[in-house]
Image (cartoon, grey):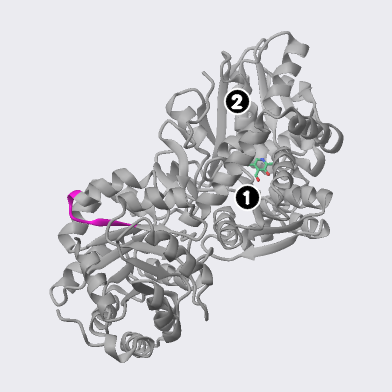
């Protein structure tokens, strides 16, 4: 199977385009712009060059020996997206999209951000190419990720606080869409996850698939075979789909880890595939969605801003229904514990988002044999989260 | 010809049709009904009722806040559907529900069509459902005698206009400019150009909306289109009100200032 969406951007019943009519023309322009470069060697050469020389790819596939031995089960490898320039996988997608925006002649770039990593990555590529950059960010996230707000400003971006709804990622996306609908002629919307209307979920997945392609080559080189299981955290779904996609036709188990937050009640977590998640339409795409009985979008909670979102990329909804990818959740406590464990056993401070994937690895590795190979996507580094974690530890008397 | 189409064409003969928009349940359901009845008395030809939604991405701050006020009061789609039924006991003006897709999807498209028809709803406009997605829904709504109203925008290509107009019912809602809802002092020249383009593909009446807030804008729109939609400017009056009675009075006063005398008091119903 090739796991391509149909021409309207649907994977099965998921995806598509649910937008105000004004956005159809710019989305069509974006789609044809993207398909024009998708198989263009010139574009890919430019993309690869920046990934190599600016981002620092390929990112290492690191054997976490002490962690593996401490857990006493599977051999755990970490795909080190945390070592990328700007500290997370988000930059891969930004490099791809900024090159596209340039080809499309767009001079003004807008983006939304949750944890601030996508905002920082967008501000970075805008600085690199001298383009105007406006980043929308929920005021709650600005509080949680103060350092990233300052980083974006240092990079010359304008950060606009959004204080509607839950003041988090979802609300930032609404505001970015409002900006785009108003400034369609001049503006390129650089969406940060495998979400939103067609062609974003496809395009972002393509750009992030560099993670899985590298990991596949690297594990074959190191171990002479494919891994048994892949684990990645799932916010909108970009780092996970980027790792998973090149393995979809292999006999490899895959687990996406959602944010279990602080409980199973609606509003206390961001686990779309738990009971409360029902199919719905939000921000341009049809997918699983945390909502109340009246179709209003539910508030979500996670200790990590980057996983705190009510919907999930449509390709994940499809892979879930096909039973090709399993979805689990890790709660705030598990993630905080994993944050400490990885810091102490490997000297690697993971992003709180990535800590959810690590938490799940910690849970399942001991049940596996020493011959089993697991790859965990370490989607980002935890520098941005140190203040939050300190606050959370103080609350818990740790 | 549907009731909506007939009504707008009749109004156009006298100059133009007036279509106000308010969010249902802002500030509460009872006041909303009084406001809508007052709008009917004050020269409205079709009334647009917004279904509150948590994430109104096509709306500017005024309607966002209004939607949120209704939600804060616990207003549900079921409550919204009760309003036309009450209204119908006193007035016969067509009602169009203006909604984002998710609340309808959650309610169930079939269940919604049946309930809306039973409540006396004439049309439904789904902000985030576009041509292609809309065809099946439009056919389903038509079974219950409900028009799915189509939106067109200045960015809509002629090719899409043709496709949209082929399946359109009721009237065509032309968005005056690229952007979100919100009052403006002037109407963009893009609106007139868009209406001219739409005319080539349909005989249905054309309404212009987004950013219309003054009497001058209304009469200007009537020169080249059949109907003018006024939303945020009315909603802003409700927002400023200090009591339910004050809200009704403010809306009445504002609309009286918006419409020329000929258009007023012609509600034959
Ligand atoms: C480090 C990191 N990992 C993961 C995510 C979640 O996003 P996605 O599911 O698109 O990878 C974010 C989002 O901000 C992030 O910053």
- Residue denoted by label 1: A305
- Residue denoted by label 2: A245
Along the line of sight, the residue nearer the viewer: B111 or B186: B186
Q: Residues within 10 Å of mark 1 (few under 14, many from 20)?
A: many
Disc 2: host chain: A
The x, y position of residue B79, in whole percent, is 26, 64
* Image quarter of residue A238: top right
| Badge 1 residue CB within 8 Å of ligand 1 | yes
Q: Which residues are magenta?
A: B143-149
Which quadrant of the figure shows ligand 1?
A: top right
Residue drawn at x 63%, y 50% as measured from the top left: A305
- Element assignment for label 1: helix
Q: Residues within 10 Å of mark 2 (few under 14, many from 20)?
A: many
Please tell me the numbered disc located at residue B72.
none
Viewer-side label of 2, 1: 2
Q: Gap between marks 2 and 1, in whole Å?
A: 24 Å
């Amino acid at each position: 199977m090739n796991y391509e969406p149909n021409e309207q951007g649907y994977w099965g019943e998921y995806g598509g385009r649910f937008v105000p009519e004004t956005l159809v023309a710019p989305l069509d322009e974006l789609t044809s712009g993207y398909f024009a470069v998708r198989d263009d060697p010139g574009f890919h050469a430019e993309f690869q060059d920046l990934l190599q020389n600016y981002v620092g790819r390929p990112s290492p596939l690191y054997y976490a020996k002490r962690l593996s031995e401490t857990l006493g089960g599977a051999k755990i490898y970490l795909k080190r997206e945390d070592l990328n320039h700007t500290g997370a996988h988000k930059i891969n997608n930004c490099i791809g999209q900024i090159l596209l925006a340039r080809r499309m002649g767009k001079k003004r770039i807008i983006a939304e951000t949750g944890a601030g990593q996508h905002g920082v990555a967008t501000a970075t590529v805008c600085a690199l190419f001298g383009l105007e950059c406006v980043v929308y960010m929920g005021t709650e996230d600005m509080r949680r990720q103060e350092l990233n707000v300052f980083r974006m400003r240092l990079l010359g971006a304008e950060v606009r606080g959004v204080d509607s709804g839950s003041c988090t990622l979802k609300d930032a996306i609404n505001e970015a869409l409002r900006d785009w609908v108003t400034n369609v002629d001049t503006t390129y919307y650089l969406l940060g996850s495998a979400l939103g209307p067609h062609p974003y979920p496809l395009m972002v997945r393509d750009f992030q698939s560099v993670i899985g392609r590298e990991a596949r080559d690297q594990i074959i080189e190191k171990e002479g075979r494919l891994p048994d299981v892949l684990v990645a955290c799932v916010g909108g779904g970009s780092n996970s789909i980027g790792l998973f996609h090149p393995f979809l036709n292999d006999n490899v188990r895959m687990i996406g880890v959602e944010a279990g937050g602080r409980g199973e009640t609606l509003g206390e977590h961001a686990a779309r595939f738990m009971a409360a998640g029902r199919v719905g339409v939000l921000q341009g795409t049809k997918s699983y969605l945390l909502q109340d009985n009246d179709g209003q979008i539910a508030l979500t909670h996670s200790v990590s801003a980057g996983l705190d979102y009510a919907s999930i990329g449509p390709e994940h909804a499809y892979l879930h229904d096909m039973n090709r990818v399993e979805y689990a959740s890790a709660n705030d406590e598990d993630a905080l514990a994993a944050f400490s464990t990885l810091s102490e056993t490997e000297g690697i401070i993971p992003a709180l988002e990535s800590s959810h994937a690590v938490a799940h690895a910690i849970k399942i590795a001991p049940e596996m044999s020493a011959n089993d190979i697991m790859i965990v996507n370490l989607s980002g580094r935890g520098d941005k989260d140190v203040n939050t974690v300190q606050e959370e530890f103080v609350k818990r008397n740790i | 010809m549907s009731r909506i189409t007939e009504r707008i064409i009749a109004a156009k003969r006298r100059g133009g049709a007036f279509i106000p928009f308010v969010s249902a349940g802002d500030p509460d359901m009872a006041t909303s009904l009084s406001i809508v009845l007052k709008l009917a008395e004050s020269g409205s030809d079709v009334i647009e009722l917004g279904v509150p939604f948590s994430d109104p991405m096509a709306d500017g701050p005024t309607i966002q806040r209004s939607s949120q006020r209704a939600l804060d009061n616990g207003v549900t789609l079921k409550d919204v559907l009760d309003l036309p039924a009450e209204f119908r006991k006193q007035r016969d003006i067509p009602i169009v529900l203006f909604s984002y897709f998710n609340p309808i999807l959650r309610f169930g498209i079939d269940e919604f069509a049946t309930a809306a028809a039973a409540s006396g709803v004439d049309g439904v406009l789904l902000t985030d459902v576009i041509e292609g997605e809309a065809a099946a829904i439009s056919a389903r709504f038509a079974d219950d005698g409900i028009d799915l109203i189509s939106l067109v925008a200045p960015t809509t290509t002629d090719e899409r206009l043709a496709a949209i107009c082929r399946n359109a019912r009721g009237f065509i809602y032309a968005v005056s400019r690229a952007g979100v809802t919100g009052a403006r002092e002037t109407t963009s020249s893009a609106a007139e150009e868009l209406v001219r383009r739409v005319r080539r593909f349909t005989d249905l009446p054309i309404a212009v909306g987004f950013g219309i807030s003054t009497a001058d804008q209304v009469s200007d729109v009537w020169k080249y289109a059949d109907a003018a939609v006024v939303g945020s400017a009315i909603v802003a009056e409700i927002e400023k009100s200090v009591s339910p009675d004050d809200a009704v009075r403010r809306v009445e006063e504002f609309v009286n200032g918006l419409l020329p005398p000929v258009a007023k008091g012609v509600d034959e119903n």
